[in-house]
Amino acid sequence: METTVVSLRPRWRTALITLPVLAAGPLLLVIGVQQPSLTAFAAGIGLTGYAVRNAMMVLRGFTEVWPDGLYNQLAAYPAEVAWERVERLIVMRTLFGRYVQVEERDGQRISLAAPRSGLITRTPDFDAHLTTIGAMPGGSRPPIPAQRTQPIPMIVSQAVLTFGICAAVLTAVLTY
């Protein structure tokens, strides 16, 4: 009997934003130290952490989907879940793209390393991978339903936060 395993990795193109952010983060840290600016320093720490996490996710992240469950390695923490514990798949839409979360019956969620689709660099097979994951449970298990989130309130709040961070960065750079 042949066991089907689907192995997915994040595409490096979806993390293209990492390169300019990785350059901007340390620059803001230096500005925050040289010209005492808590805003620039905090933004530099945040941007550097975000870029390092994205780089780790692209380099180390993967999702393996088995007939019995799935194994996921995001940036640093592995997670394994059996299909019996999975309630649904949730497509999370953000200001910067889409990713998939697995919601367990107890309410706990696991963010998958793949599939992911970026704002600028779309992943054309995102929906096909989502369908494959949902249909993967083996034996007599039913397919896992996928729910797509309503993005408007989430995207508005993310846009406001992003605008605030950009304004803080611009203020720190212009006053340097």
Image: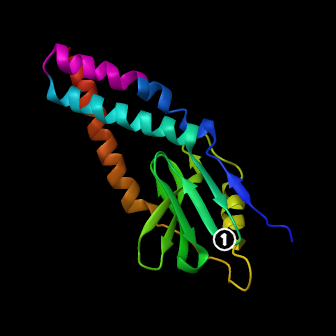
Residue 122 occupies which quadrant of the picture? top right
Which element type, helix, strand or loop, lies under badge 1? helix
Pick the residue in front: 44 or 120. 44
Residue drawn at point x = 69 percent, y = 75 percent: 137
From what the image shows, is residue 165 above or below residue 26?
below
Q: Which residues are magenta?
A: 23-36
Q: Is residue 18 magenta?
A: no
Residue drawn at point x = 30 percent, y = 36 percent: 46
Residue that carries the numbered disc 1 in the rendered image: 134
* Residue lying at the far bottom of the rendered structure: 140
From what the image shows, is residue 82 above or below residue 72?
below
From what the image shows, is residue 150 above or below residue 171?
below
Callout 1: few (<14), some (14-19), or many (20+) C-alpha neighbours within 10 Å? Answer: some
Residue drawn at point x = 33 percent, y = 22 percent: 26
From what the image shows, is residue 22 above or below residue 99?
above
| Residue 120 visible | no
* Residue lying at the far left of the rendered structure: 36
Q: Quadrant of the N terminus?
A: bottom right
Residue 32 occupies which quadrant of the picture? top left
Residue 131 x, y percent position in the rendering? 70, 67
* Horizontal relation, residue 83 to residue 40: left or right: right
Residue 97 x, y percent position in the rendering? 52, 49
Q: Quadrant of the C terminus?
A: top left
Residue 171 occupies which quadrant of the picture? top left
Residue drawn at point x = 18 percent, y = 30 percent: 39
